[in-house]
Amino acid sequence: MGVLQYVAKRVGLYLAVLFIGLTITFLLPRIMPTNPIDGYIGQIQARASGALTAEAIAQLRANLEELYGLRGDLFSQYVGFLQRVIFHFDFGPSFAFYPQSVSQIIFTALPWTLGLLLVSTVIAWLLGNLVGLVAGYFHTKRAGSVIEIVGILLYPIPYYILALTVILLLSYVIPLFPLSPSFPAGQMTLTKFGMVIFNSLLPALTLILAGFGWNILSMKALAVATTEEPYVIYSRLKGTSNWTRMMSYVFRNAMLPQVTALALSLGTIFNGALLTEMLFSYPGVGLIMRTAASAGDYNVLYGAITISIIAVATAGLVIDLIYPLLDPRIRHK
Amino acid sequence: MSTPAITEVVEPVPPTRQRGEGLLWLLNGRLALGLTLIAILGVGSFVLPIFCPVDPSVQATYLKNMPISGAHWLGTNALGQDILWFLVFAIRNSLMLGVLVGVCVTVISTIVGLSAGYIGGNFERAVMLIVDSFITIPLLPILIILGAVIRGNSSFLTVGFIIVVFGWAWGARTIRSMALTLREREFINMARFSGANTFDILLREIFPYVTAYMLVGFINTVLFAINTEATLAVIGLSKVEVPTLGSIIFWALNYNALFTGNYVWLVAPIIATVLLFLGLFLSSTGFNAAFASKRGVL
């Protein structure tokens, strides 16, 4: 019963996140005072040095409104938007790369982003939590405080600063990596694969460093509190080894809030990944967003954002659905 | 960007009495260090502009790419601007934006969190659904599309407004959980039986307990706002003509400061940002720990 309730609640939240996310992406640009079509027409007018007639402009406007899905009143636009997105996964054609469809562009970039995110998030979570665990478990020792200071120094530093510092140190001061990495397209060969891995090391390192600090700090706080629980003291009196106590008594319990926190912070981690991709020219969804934003390619932007929201919400759902496997209290309620 | 998250996890585990006293010196040291950093950067960036000879955002005021000298303590950049003055104005603008957003967000999240936690029922469920959605939705993509749509026509304040729209949820969640525990306390029942209405109870009985956290939440929001604006600026989607901690880096990257060897242009804002963020973070955790240990002792 407990599990069913839990799953129902979680799926409800999932649907709400999708609904609210899609509604925001639909509404916000529309309530902004500027109209992208005016800007676009202005650009074309400028290129034609003012030679466009009023009829031509009206026709252009009608065509653009059709393509952007801006025809009709707000409500019918909204229904059309939801229909296209949910049932057909159709975001129309890209304007900058005309015949290519938006979903095509995004689906070539998505594996890159997911690969980078998955690897770096798992490493950052495991490493950060284990280091935090050791620091919290041995919080009376000096090394525990030293580790905490590392966490304090790393945690508040914004992603872009971390990324720039990593670039500065590892490709400028010590030229280990290229300043502008290249990612080969087309058929994967072994050498190309090696190159991709090598060039992904810096973005991955940035993401790991960024996730590391928070995990250390919060795991340490949790581990310190858990270490003083009566059942841990009891197991010590029973004569269990430090290792058993740390892993199966303290970590097993302190890990649970960390899993929840991971699910809640996925959006933030994803933001960092997008930014990292932009700064390292890594060919994922983030880079596509940046090019689309500067080219005014709104269809691509909408597609990328919708897919990001769906991806982040789904990942959160998956983590939360795994949670009952980790926490027996939900299963046996 | 995950700034507000830390209080969420740290807050529910206040140190026990013994530990609180043992760490009191360290915690106060943390707070003192943080406040000192903020004070130096804050006072410096608000007082120094009075003595500034020219508007630092005007381009081609000086010769380009001059090295560090007596006249230009950090040299000049490829746009002919004095790097030090630009940086001073950037810190000031970023701080002003952060404080403005911080005030708005703190007010909104306190009202939402208190009412949700105290009133409860379906109202709370509906509010929490919205709050959790706002927390889960990745912010940057939405900011990017907004930035692309309003670019050129946005004012600096529009950026602040957008950050407020997306920044209130974490605080609301924390304050609601505090209100939840307070709701069950004896003195609240006492007040209710004495005939106080919901608004009175929220304002006079629960609110004073939440003020301590509000300060911590406020600092976290300042951090979050400065970070978000700077992030947008770095990718060129904020008002980059206004000097902020992000727009300096935007210009430095756009003019390839690293390739041209003008590394001060890039390193100076990085150091300033790290110091400011460290200061804000240390003060926020310092306050949090100080309040927690005070609660434990009392």
Image (spheres, coloured by chain):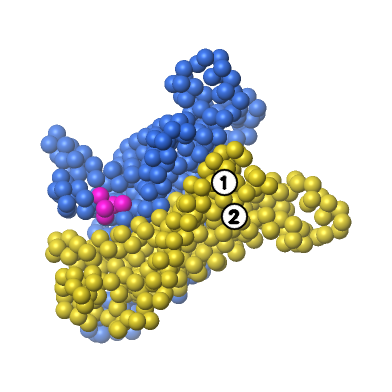
Between A182 and A247, the residue placed more toward the observer is: A247
Q: Which residue is mark 1?
A: B11
Q: Position of residue A70 (x, y in %)?
A: 43, 67
Count the marks: how many? 2
Q: Position of residue A147 (x, y in %)?
A: 39, 39
Q: Residue at x 48, y 47 (%)?
A: B26
| Residue A280: mark | none
Tell me if I can see residue A21 in this picture: no
Q: CA distance from mark 1 to mark 2?
A: 9 Å
Tell me if I can see residue B176 in this picture: yes
Residue type at mark 2 is Tyr
Is residue A114 found inside the magenta-colored segment of the image?
no
Q: Residue at x 30, y 75 (%)?
A: B85
Quarter of the figure with the N terminus of chain B: bottom left
Going from N to C along the chain, the mark reached first, 1 or 2, is 1
Provide the secondary structure element on which disc 2 rests.
helix
Q: Residues within 10 Å of mark 1 (few under 14, many from 20)?
A: some
Is residue B49 placed above or below A177 in the rendered structure? below
Residue type at mark 1 is Glu
Most common secondary structure along the magenta stretch: helix
Q: Which residues are magenta?
A: A162-166
Q: Chain of mark 2?
A: B
Q: Position of residue B194 (x, y in %)?
A: 87, 56
For chain B, give the colour. Answer: yellow
Provide the secondary structure element on which disc 1 rests.
loop
Q: Residues within 10 Å of mark 2 (few under 14, many from 20)?
A: many
Q: Which residue is mark 2?
A: B213
Q: Which chain is blue?
A: A
The reply to whether the C-beta atoms of the residues labelled 1 and 2 are less than 8 Å apart is yes
Q: Residue at x 20, y 44 (%)?
A: A199
